[in-house]
Image: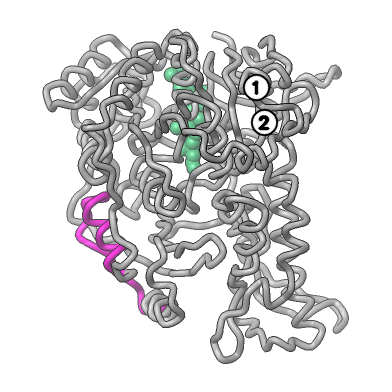
Amino acid sequence: MKTDIEIAQEAQAARIEDIARAESIDEKYLEQYGKDKAKVSYQLLKDTEGKPDGKLVLVTAITPTPAGEGKTTTSVGLADGLKRLGKSVAVALREPSLGPVFGVKGGAAGGGYAQVVPMEEINLHFTGDFHAIGAANNLLAALIDNHIFQGNALRIDDKRITWKRAVDMNDRQLRNIIDGLGKRTDGRVREDGFEITVASEIMAVFCLAKDLKDLKERLARMIIGYNMDNEPVTAGDLHAEGALTALLKDALKPNLVQTLEHTPAFIHGGPFANIAHGCNSVLATRLALRLNDYAVTEAGFGADLGAEKFIDIKCRMTGLRPDCAVVVATVRALKHHGGVDKAELNTPNVEALKKGLPNLLQHVENMTKVFGLPTVVAINRFPFDSEEELNCIADECKKLGVNVVLSEVWAKGGEGSEALAREVMRLCEDKADNHFRFAYEDSDSLEEKLNKIVREVYRGDGVVLTAEAKKQAKRLEELGFGHYPVCMAKTQFSFSDNKNLTGAPRGFKITVREVKVSAGAGFIVVKTGDIMTMPGLPKVPAAEHIDVDENGKITGLF
Ligand SMILES: Nc1ncnc2c1ncn2[C@@H]1O[C@H](COP(=O)(O)OP(=O)(O)O)[C@@H](O)[C@H]1O
Ligand SMILES: O=COP(=O)(O)O
Ligand SMILES: [Mg+2]
């Protein structure tokens, strides 16, 4: 079997202007970045106002193993399958972060014969959006410290600066730092720290902004910390929003590339779903919907994270509504939830598989009952899955009335998802079965929102706020942010806040240790357990297996 990068490098991609033409994107909206990448002006959305949108398909998954269970791969393959059935379709995905690319997980361009191309460029610098977001984040950080150095007219309390510096890398060494060292003219000494760019509030603002004006207004509202009277200080107070918007103006245009089967792919923005809201930009989703009968989009990690935030944050803010949901499940992840060690996941084990099924069933119940969406389980077939294991999942699901289809997109591309594509089309057409709802209401208090998510989605016994978190929550409600939706920052490896509690755990509480408002993004970030916004590299980083030959050909990217 060829590697992902070998398959991608052998691909005969169409010229990006031909992909755009097939999407009826007039060349006046298209800015090419080479022969196989382009940006599409958001003006196209304004100029096609009133044109009906296509159907929105949300792809989520069960609680993943660290390698991931194939949401991106399935999203790409499903879009290819819908195209094979004659539908106009696009896939809308997030841009990969260099953290996982050089860390554990690898790239985020799909896999096998269900990939977006040019895979190396998409996984590395792409069109520079993350660099622009990082620069904007760090310009604001520099303006904060410079304001203090130049006399601190806003009386910023340097013990209450909530704004972090950012870099798109897994670098634990930068989590907690002291800077401003040196001579008096070298700055003011203070505790500081970095978060990974995908956790920056600017990334969230970028992904939720509906146009350039909204982007700038949101940037101005971002709270960077508090003054000596514990009053919020915003980026607008520092007159930063104009410069930040200048840095982001071009990045805000969604990127257009293609799948191996020349299906259009809008790839834009990249928040992780454990430490951020986990969805690609609203602009990219809207473009995919406006130009096609179907838009297939992914929300990160398991349905307890990405799908919950897609619904309770992105849909709540935009009015978007999924027409159906696809829950990706794998034999290996179900065996993992059945207690099998990583080294044994390729060994057939039906008993363990059955023990892991409750994790799948809980995610399916959440999508159908908590969020009211027509749902299908896509079993993402891996090479070492046995027929007996695959039949076991299908039989158990059917016994419980769970809709399930086998997906073979990794091995076969779009041909491997035609059955899934047909089921998705059926679910989207059957509006009677769509009872979309949020997990909580705007009017719920912050603690009520948290308890509804933990009890209804995670099936926990509720939340416990530390004394510090309680103080922060009270202050945010006093400041009028209590009606904001919440963005749960939680481990992706468990419904609980303990990554070792696999399967469908019960009898646990979620400990909230920090509550911080992202006033520009319009939600409250709730840090649980020991979740961190600056991941670290593993013992053997993927970076060690990446190389480039004398002709510039990259190997080892996956
Ligand atoms: N059916 C499959 N067989 C083999 N490898 C797969 C399959 N599906 C996905 N992968 C690989 O697993 C990893 C995670 O896939 P991805 O689609 O990124 O998952 P997610 O989006 O859920 O994190 C990628 O390296 C991808 O190539
Ligand atoms: O935010 C995480 O996204 P994936 O689940 O696609 O890795
Ligand atoms: Mg993915």
SS for dot 1: strand
x and y percent of residue 209 in the render?
58, 53
Q: Which mark is residue 95?
A: none
Q: Amino acid at mark 1?
A: Val
Name the quarter where the C terminus is drawn: top right
Residue 420: where, in percent of width, then height?
Answer: 35, 17
Q: Nearer the viewer, residue 528 or 177?
A: 528
Magenta residue check for 461:
yes
> Above or below — where is 115 with respect to 487?
above
Left/right placement of residue 75 relative to residue 122 reads left
Above/below status of 452 relative to 366:
below
Residue 549 part of the magenta segment? no
Q: Secondary structure at mark 2?
A: helix
Q: Which residue is mark 1?
A: 117
Q: Residue at x 65, y 42 (%)?
A: 42
CB contact under 8 Å: marks 2 and 1: yes
Q: Position of residue 189 (x, y in %)?
A: 74, 79
Q: Is residue 526 visible?
A: yes
Q: Amino acid at mark 2?
A: Ile
Q: Residue at x 42, y 10 (%)?
A: 416
Locate residue 394: give its quadrant. Answer: top left
- 527 relative to 41, above or below: below
Residue sitting at the far front:
50
Residue under numbered circle 2: 122
Q: What span is in magenta? A: 447-468
Horizontal side of 460 relative to 173 (left or right) equals left
Crowd class of label 1 (few under 14; some 14 to 19; many from 20; radius 10 Å): many
Q: Dot 2: within a 10 Å radius of its alpha carbon, few (fewer than 14), some, or many (20 or more) residues?
A: many
Nearer to us in this view, 168 or 221: 221
- Whole-Å distance between the Cαs marked 2 and 1? 7 Å
Front position in the image: 161 or 94? 94
